Amino acid sequence: QVQLVESGGGLVQSGGSLRLSCAASGIIFSMYDMNWYRQAPGKQRELVATISSGGRTNYADSVKGRFTISRDDAKNTVYLQMNSLKSEDTAVYYCNAWRVPGREYWGQGTQVTVSS
């Protein structure tokens, strides 16, 4: 059974930092591209950051220079370090594991709230 379990969300003031973690089980973690998505109230889910199985990273323009995605294949965990948080970063953040179409899994989400 595949599980992706996010943690690290919470309430933080504008300008603050949080680190999200996503622990995976039931998959060969090192073979999967790992992604962080977010969904704000009334908005569509959007891709925030990606790290490929080979370690290449990509970011949404809105978070470049503020967020850093990383992975530890030995711990089957992906991280999202979020700095200089803004109120518009408030959303539910979801971990996603993708290998090929049909081999995609989601976590349950963790709430991040940034107060201004």
Image (cartoon, helix red, strand yellow):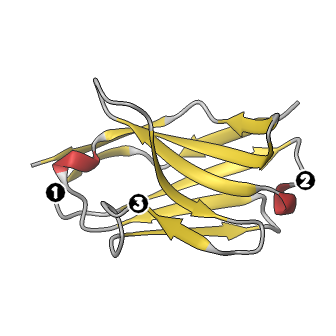
Question: Which residue, given by chain and number where applicable, does mark 1 sit on?
Answer: 14
What residue do we see at 64% from left, 59% from top? 78
Q: Position of residue 107 (x, y in %)?
A: 63, 35
Residues under labels 3 and 2: Cα distance? 26 Å
Q: Earlier in the sequence, mark 1 or mark 2?
A: 1
Three-letter residue code for mark 3: Ala
Q: Residue furthest front?
A: 101
Q: Nearer the viewer, mark 3 or mark 2?
A: 3
Q: Position of residue 3 (x, y in %)?
A: 76, 36
Q: Quadrant of the N terminus?
A: top right
- Tell me the SS state at disc 1: loop
What residue do we see at 71% from left, 47% from top? 97
Tag 1 near tag 3, CB within 8 Å: no
Q: Nearer the viewer, mark 1 or mark 2?
A: 2
Residue in the foreground of this view, choosing between 37 and 70: 37
Say left or right for 39 vs 106. left
Tag 3 near tag 2, CB within 8 Å: no
Residue 106 drawn above or below residue 50: above
Residue 97 drawn above or below residue 49: above
Three-letter residue code for mark 1: Ser
Circle 3 Cα neighbour tier, 10 Å, few/some/many (<14 / 14–19 / ≥20) = few
Indicate the quadrant where residue 62 lies: bottom left
Name the mark on residue 60.
Answer: 3
Three-letter residue code for mark 2: Ile
Question: Which residue, given by chain and number where applicable, does mark 2 sit on?
Answer: 28
Tag 1 near tag 2, CB within 8 Å: no
Q: Position of residue 76 (x, y in %)?
A: 78, 58
What residue do we see at 79% from left, 56% from top? 32
